Image (cartoon, grey):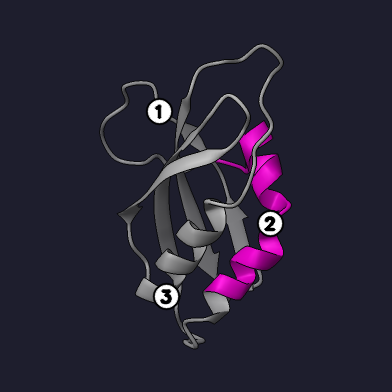
Amino acid sequence: MRLVLFVLILAGCAGPIPKPEAKPKTPIADDLRGHEAELKACFERAHDPNLEGRLVLQWDIGAKGRVSQVRVVQPLHPEIDDCVAGALENWTFRVEPGEDKVRRVLYPFTFSTRDE
């Protein structure tokens, strides 16, 4: 199973979600890579070897890196959607020292069974 991670931080952005040229190296993407085993376990809950696609979630990261306001923007499969959203609520992200703003994140998780 291959899991592709990339991130788009919202700043009053509207429109379609862009496809990245390559995997970006951002602190959020790095933090998410630490949870690949959990994401894989969520994907495997669907019990569908042919399932592929994109789950897009939106969430806020507070001043202490805690996640809140998780919302499914583009669903993939009900079991996967619920599992990833539920896991995300328990994760903590790195924040820059002195950063006190809430950051809203829009993140597409691409799930595939192909080894590319």
Q: Which mark is residue 10?
A: 1
Q: Mark 1 belongs to which amino acid?
A: Leu
Crowding around mark 1 (Cα neighbors within 10 Å: few <14, some 14 to 19, many 20+) is: few
Task: Choose top left, top right, bottom left or bottom right for residue 116.
Answer: bottom right
- Mark 1 lies on a secondary structure that is loop
- Mark 3 lies on a secondary structure that is helix
User: Is 63 above or below relative to 4?
Assistant: above
- Mark 2 lies on a secondary structure that is loop
Q: Which residues are magenta?
A: 20-42
Q: Which residue is mark 3?
A: 79
Residue 60: image location, x then y, percent: 46, 35
Residue drawn at point x = 40 percent, y = 39 percent: 18
Magenta residue check for 116 = no
Looking at the image, residue 79 sits to the left or right of residue 5; the answer is left
- In the rendered image, the residue lying farthest to the left is 15
Q: Mark 3 belongs to which amino acid?
A: Glu
Q: Mark 2 belongs to which amino acid?
A: His
* 53 or 22, nearer to the observer: 53
Q: Which residue is mark 2?
A: 35
Residue 24: image location, x then y, percent: 63, 37
